[in-house]
Amino acid sequence: MTTTHTHGAVDVHAHWYPQPFLDLLAKEGPTHGLEWREVEGKGPQFKVGHLTTGPAGPRFVDLDARLQAMDEQGVAVHALSLSQPMVYWAGRSLGERLAATYNEAIARAHERAPERLVGLAALPMHEPDLAVKEVDRAARLAGVRGFYLATRVNERDLSDEAFFPVYERIAALGLPIFLHPIFVLAPERLQKFYLTNLLGNPFESAIAAAHLVFGGVLDRFPRLVFVLPHAGGAFPWLVGRLSRGWEKRQDLKHIARAPIDYLRSFYYDTIGYSDDVLEYLVRVIGADRVLMGSDYCFPIAYERPVEVVTAHPRLDAAAKRAITEENARRLLHL
């Protein structure tokens, strides 16, 4: 049975591979080290480094299939975002073209379903000068409501001052930055048991958040809004340890506040796979800093992202409404 989206729920963590992006990836990616193969009846599969993605079948690509899935889930809006392997591996020229191709596809998707599809623009962050130009260009495209960065850009963490001009431009636009892990720490230890995703991704988010705090990014750009995926990963759980280090180590005193005081400087999605995790975020950080997400449509994505919130046994109606709809609509200017 198809359900309606009467609650106006917004899914902020919904991955998409538009066909023009995949076509460019297939044509030119292999010359930059990408491995590409077609899986019969299932779509393309591609690999960069330790990351294997796909098969990227119709649910990842086709907008009709997506809109039908959204109806079935009771989701009104998807904030479309790229996923692994992003574009930083692709060099200067191809990386720039891949990002631009993706962002133009967001505009076309939005024009097709303006009330239901918006997007988070990709940036060639490995070339910060090009990223600044793409920020300005993409922000003028229909449907772009924010930007999407990896938690690390090749060998550079997000505290690298090379990225500060990009942050400055995004802050001036008043648009949020959504983060997502790509390549993870110590992948050789995480290949078995799907641990690159199950453990690698949450710890990458914690590392990125720590760099933004200790690296002074949040202090230097107070208007800049970062959204942490996967319920903040390990960051909300380890922030007390980070704060203990700040209290006891003089080399960490270059920031004026304890890391725990930055918890509300971030937004967090609902993808924690636990009622207790979601309750913790609401109780400790606040319902106004939590956004509904599904991780559409990776293998461990939520099938019923709205119900994860609305069926929660310990959240009140105001918190549920804020998380499923109000916070995202405010943040994304919907």
Image: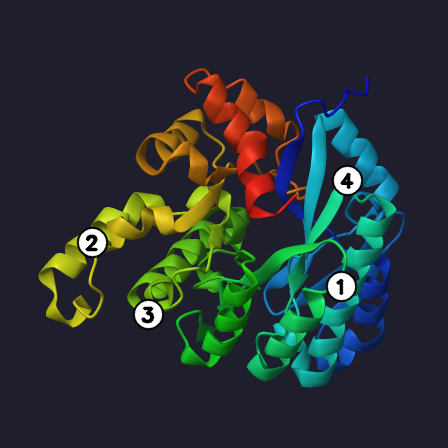
Q: Measure the C-alpha gap from mark 2 to mark 1.
A: 39 Å
Residue 310: % across, % down? 55, 20
User: Whole-percent x and y of residue 163?
Assistant: 48, 76
**What is the CA distance from the residue labelled 2 to the residue labelled 3?**
14 Å
Q: Quadrant of the C terminus?
A: top right
- Vertical placement of residue 15 versus 279, above or below: below
Q: Nearer the viewer, residue 318 or 33?
A: 318
How packed mark 1 is, by other alpha carbons closer than 10 Å (few <14, some 14-19, many 20 or more), is: many
Q: Quadrant of residue 204?
A: bottom left
* Amino acid type, callout 2: Ser
Q: CA distance from mark 3 to mark 4?
A: 38 Å
Give the quarter of the figure containing the N terminus: top right
Of pointers 3 and 1, the one earlier in the residue sequence: 1
Q: Earlier in the sequence, mark 2 or mark 3?
A: 3
The disc placed on residue 294 is none
Q: Nearer the viewer, mark 3 or mark 4?
A: 4
User: Mark 3 = which residue?
Assistant: 215
**Residue holding disc 2:** 243
Q: Residue at x 46, y 25 (%)?
A: 319
**Disc 2 versus disc 4: nearer the observer:** 4
In the image, is residue 163 above or below residue 227?
below
**Residue indicated by mark 4:** 115
Q: Earlier in the sequence, mark 2 or mark 4?
A: 4
CA–CA distance in space, label 2 to label 4? 42 Å
Q: Amino acid at mark 4?
A: Glu
Label 1: state its secondary structure: helix
Q: Which mark is residue 102?
A: 1
Q: Amino acid at mark 3?
A: Gly
Query: Element type at marker 2?
Result: helix
